[in-house]
Image (cartoon, rainbow, N blue to C red):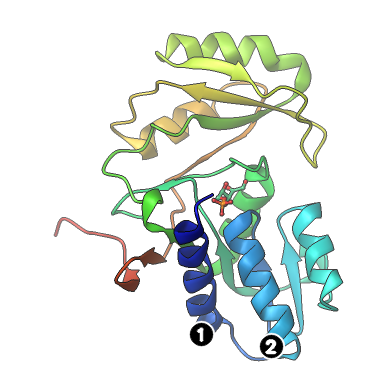
C-alpha cells in the first residue's frame, strides 16, 4: 500500500468518527481502512460507544486491544450504524467486499444496521464492479460444484488457497465477471446450493460513502436516476 493511499485511509477513518453516535453499540467491519478507524476510535474516543459488534475475529481482537467491549449480535436490539470498507464501490453504492474473507459476517452486520457508512480511498470507486475478483464464501463440500456454476456465468473461479473463514468455510474468488446488473447477479448467486454468501453488496448497499481523495474527503450518497 502506498503512503498516499495510507493517508487517504486515515483521512476517511477520521471522517467516520463523526458518524459514531454517543453511548450506542455500533457495527465495525474488517480490513486495513477499518483498522485505521478502530485505532483512532480506541486512541481518541474509546469511551464514546457502549460496545461494538465486529465482523471478524481480527477486528474483535483489535477492538479489545483498545479496551472496547465486543459483544455478540444476538445480544443487541439495534445497530444504528455499521462502518466498513469495500474492495470496489460504484456510484449507486453497490459494493464488492470480502477481500479479507469476512463477507458473510459483514453482510449480516450491514443487514442488521440502520445506516451503513462505507469508508474507502479513491482507488475503490469504479464505474462498473468486477475488476476486483468477486469473493464467494462456500460450504467446503460444495466448492467444485459452485466453481462450475460460476464458470457457467462466464467467470474464472479460483479457490483462495489456505483460507478458511471465521465460519469454517472456503472462499472462491471469481475473476473476469462482467457485472452489468449487480442486484440480479447477487440474487442468482445466492440461489446456488452451497453458497453461504457472495461478496456483492447490492441489495443492501451503503447509505453513505466517505471517499478519500487527494483534495480531501468527499461524502457521496447513492446516485439515483430519478
Ligand atoms: C473484508 C472487506 C474489506 O472491507 C475490504 O477488503 C476492504 O479492505 P481494505 O480496507 O483493507 O482495503 O470486505 O472482507
Farthest residue, direction front: 3
Q: Residues within 10 Å of mark 2 (few under 14, many from 20)?
A: some
Q: Earlier in the sequence, mark 2 or mark 1?
A: 1
- CB at disc 2 and ligand 1 closer than 8 Å: no
Residue with the mark numbered 1: 18
Task: Answer with the quarter of the image where residue 128 lies.
Answer: top left
Q: Residue at x 74, y 85 (%)?
A: 46
Q: Would you say 55 lies left or right of 13 here?
A: right
Q: Residue at x 67, y 40 (%)?
A: 101
Q: Would you say 101 lies left or right of 199 here?
A: right
Q: Are marks 2 and 1 in contact (CB under 8 Å)?
A: no
SS at mark 2?
helix
Farthest residue, direction left: 226
Q: Residue 49: where, in percent of width, then height?
A: 71, 85
Q: Residues within 10 Å of mark 1 (few under 14, many from 20)?
A: few
Q: Residue 204: where, in percent of width, then height?
A: 46, 53
Residue 118 in view (yes/no): no
| Mark count | 2
Residue 39 versus residue 173 in the image, above or below = below
Point out which mark residue 45 bears: 2
Q: Would you say 47 lies left or right of 120 here?
A: right
Point out which mark residue 116 bears: none
Residue 95 versus residue 184 in the image, above or below = below
SS at mark 1?
helix
Residue 202 versus residue 157 in the image, above or below = below
Q: Nearer the viewer, residue 116 or 44?
A: 44
Q: Residue 37: where, in percent of width, then height?
A: 62, 71
Mark 2 to mark 1: distance in Å?
11 Å
Q: Residue at x 50, y 52 (%)?
A: 2
Task: Answer with the quarter of the image where residue 226 lies.
Answer: bottom left
Q: Residue 212: where, in percent of width, then height?
A: 40, 65
Amino acid at each position: 500500500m502506498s503512503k498516499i493511499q495510507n493517508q487517504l485511509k486515515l483521512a476517511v477513518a477520521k471522517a467516520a468518527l463523526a458518524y459514531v453516535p454517543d453511548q450506542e453499540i455500533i457495527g465495525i467491519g474488517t480490513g486495513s481502512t477499518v483498522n485505521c478507524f478502530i485505532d483512532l476510535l480506541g486512541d481518541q474516543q474509546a469511551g464514546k460507544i457502549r460496545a461494538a459488534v465486529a465482523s471478524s475475529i481480527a477486528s474483535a481482537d483489535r477492538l479489545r486491544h483498545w479496551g472496547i467491549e465486543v459483544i455478540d449480535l444476538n445480544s443487541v436490539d439495534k445497530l444504528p450504524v455499521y462502518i466498513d470498507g469495500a474492495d470496489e464501490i460504484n456510484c449507486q453504492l453497490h459494493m464488492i467486499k470480502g477481500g479479507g474473507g469476512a463477507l458473510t459476517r459483514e453482510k449480516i452486520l450491514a443487514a442488521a444496521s440502520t445506516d451503513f457508512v462505507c469508508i474507502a480511498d479513491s482507488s475503490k470507486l469504479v464505474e462498473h464492479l468486477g475488476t476486483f475478483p468477486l469473493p464467494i464464501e462456500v460450504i467446503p463440500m460444495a466448492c467444485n460444484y459452485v466453481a462450475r456454476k460460476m464458470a457457467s456465468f462466464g467467470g474464472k473461479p479460483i479457490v483462495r488457497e489456505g483460507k478458511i473463514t471465521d465460519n469454517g468455510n472456503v472462499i472462491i474468488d471469481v475473476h473476469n465477471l462482467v457485472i452489468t446488473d449487480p442486484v440480479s447477479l447477487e440474487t442468482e448467486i445466492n440461489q446456488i446450493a452451497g453458497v453461504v454468501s457472495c461478496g456483492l453488496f447490492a441489495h443492501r448497499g451503503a447509505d453513505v460513502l466517505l471517499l478519500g481523495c487527494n483534495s480531501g474527503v468527499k461524502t457521496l450518497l447513492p446516485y439515483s436516476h430519478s
